[in-house]
Image (spheres, grey):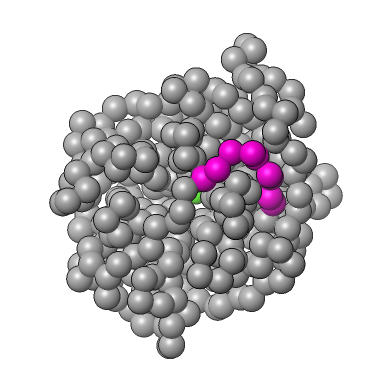
Amino acid sequence: MHDPVEGGTVTVSDRIAAVETVVAAGAELGEGPIWDARSGRIAWVDILGRRIHLTDSVTGATESIETPLQVGAIAPRAKGGFVAALQDGFWVMGDGPARRIATVPEARPGLRFNDGKCDPAGRFWAGTMAYDQAAGAAALYRLDAEGRPTRVIDGVTISNGLDWSIDGTAMYYIDSPLHRIDVFDFEPATGEIANRRIAIQIPRETGTPDGLTIDADGGIWVALWGGGAVHRYLDGRLDQVIKLPVSKPTSCAFGGAELDELYVTSASQGLSDTDRRAQPLAGALFRIRTGIRGLPARSYIGV
Ligand code: CA
């Protein structure tokens, strides 16, 4: 599983162990893993299955919360439960009855929220996509502490992975069909972004960039939908390749008590019967003990 690819630019660490299956039960579209340090669980979502899953990192025991609409992304909420980007906007889940914080004016059938994460100041960001993947129909939003959403990037097609640099002055972002990871200057005090440029170009044959996370050394880990792998980029170069037993990994996040376990979600959506027989673990949650540490997940500070 550690074959170098792409012209020998890969140095694969001996520290990376085998891919473990944590939850085999196949999600249709498993997504958005995030470490919930409060409970020692990985929280993840099944977007189309309308579930938030809370999986114990030691036992694999999973508690599931149904969501009233498709759930794109979640983050721990400092005041309890989770903030969630559902199909129509932002909600609080898992802290009493589900309640909506805000709808976005652009919400409509045919459009739903997708990946999201909190910034270094505790604002929650999440983007959208059209079910038909219409070009430029989506956007990226920022939810402030008072629960007000602001549309920050227009003309997005499939808003996907995002994370911030360790010093909090840069935001990485993926609009999947562009086949690249972009980076913006980020102003933590205001949440403003500027100066968009390309950080990493992802070759089409490698797969489509989906979710991403930044580790404690500044490495960028990105799940490659259709590529069956997670890549780590360091200083702009491909540094690690983790091959998975499924073709559609969707996102990744560090967890575990030492934050050195990489959790990877995956999808069974769109697989043919033949694909499904070849990939019985499609939709599973995986773990890789990387020997590299991640950063603590950030919580939403608001509402
Ligand atoms: Ca995604």
The magenta stretch spans residue 71? no
Please state the horizontal and vertical placement of residue 194, each as a whole percent of the image. 19, 36
Please state the horizontal and vertical placement of residue 221, each as a whole percent of the image. 53, 37
Residue 112 in sight: no
Residue 5 in sight: yes
Tell whether 235 sits left or right of 28.
left
* Quadrant placement of the C terminus: bottom left
Tell me what residue is drawn at x 29 percent, y 43 percent. Answer: 168
* Viewer-side residue, 289 vs 62: 289
Q: Quadrant of residue 8?
A: top right
The stretch in magenta equals 286-294
Tell me what residue is drawn at x 47 percent, y 40 percent. Answer: 216
The magenta stretch spans residue 292? yes
* 238 in relation to 32, above or below: above
Tell whether 257 sits left or right of 172.
right
Q: Quadrant of residue 248?
A: top right
View extreme (right): residue: 277
Please state the horizontal and vertical placement of residue 245, each as a whole percent of the image. 76, 42
* Viewer-side residue, 193 vs 177: 193
Tell me what residue is drawn at x 58 percent, y 32 percent. Answer: 231
Tell whether 112 sits left or right of 25.
left
